[in-house]
Amino acid sequence: MLSTMAHPDPVYLPTRPRAHGRPRPVPYAAPTVDLKAEYQFWQAYERLVRPLPGGGLRLAWLVFQNVYRARERFPDDTHEAALARVLFGSNMTPQRATELQDLYGLVSRRLATVAARAPRP
C-alpha cells in the first residue's frame, strides 16, 4: 500500500501498446496545458477580441477547466464525445447548450494551436 502511495500511477496518461509488459505512457500525445498561462490568454482574449459567451471569463473558466481536463484524460475522443462530456445535466437549456458549444469550440481551437506549436520529440 505504501509503495503505491509513494509512486502514484499516472492513470490518465495516454498509452501506446508494447510488445511485452504494460503499455508505455506517451507524454506527448496530448498537449500539456499551463493553466495560469491559459487564464492570462483568455483574459487578453476577452479584453481584445470579444467577450466570452456565457457570462464572461469567471463563469467560462469553469467550463474551460472541464474541457482541458477532459481533453487531457481522453485525448482520443471525437469532438462529439468530448462535447458530450461538457454538455451534461438535466437542467440544460438550449441557450446554455449553445454557449457551451461556443466555449468548447474556442478551447478546441486554442488546444489545436498549442499542440501545433509544441516541440515534437
Image (cartoon, helix red, strand yellow):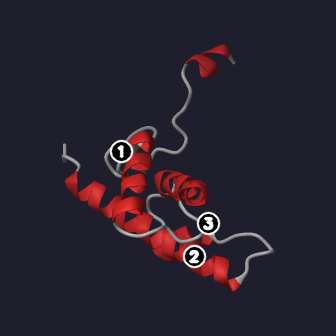
Residue shown at 40% from the left, 49% from the top: 38
Residue shown at 60% from the left, 54% from the top: 62
Check disc 1 and give the amino acid type: Val
Q: Which residue is mark 3?
A: 85
* Vertical relation: 70 (above or below) 4: below
Instruction: Give coordinates of residue 3: x percent, y percent.
Output: 60, 16
In this view of the protein, can residue 78 be seen by the observer?
Answer: no
Q: Residues within 10 Å of mark 3 (few under 14, many from 20)?
A: few
Q: Which residue is mark 1?
A: 26
Q: Which residue is mark 2?
A: 99
Q: Earlier in the sequence, mark 2 or mark 3?
A: 3
Instruction: Give coordinates of residue 105: x percent, y percent.
Output: 44, 72
Q: Earlier in the sequence, mark 1 or mark 2?
A: 1
Q: Residues within 10 Å of mark 2 (few under 14, many from 20)?
A: some
Mark 1 vs mark 3, CA separation in Å: 23 Å
**Residue sitting farthest toward the right:** 90
Residue shown at 54% from the left, 52% from the top: 65
Mark 1 vs mark 2, CA separation in Å: 33 Å
The reply to whether the C-beta atoms of the residues labelled 2 and 3 are less than 8 Å apart is: no
In this view of the protein, can residue 111 be seen by the observer?
Answer: yes
Q: Earlier in the sequence, mark 1 or mark 3?
A: 1
Q: Which mark is residue 79?
A: none
Q: Residues within 10 Å of mark 1 (few under 14, many from 20)?
A: few
Residue shown at 76% from the left, 70% from the top: 89
Instruction: Give coordinates of residue 9: x percent, y percent.
Output: 54, 32
Labels 1, 3: front one: 3
Q: Mark 1: which secondary structure?
A: loop
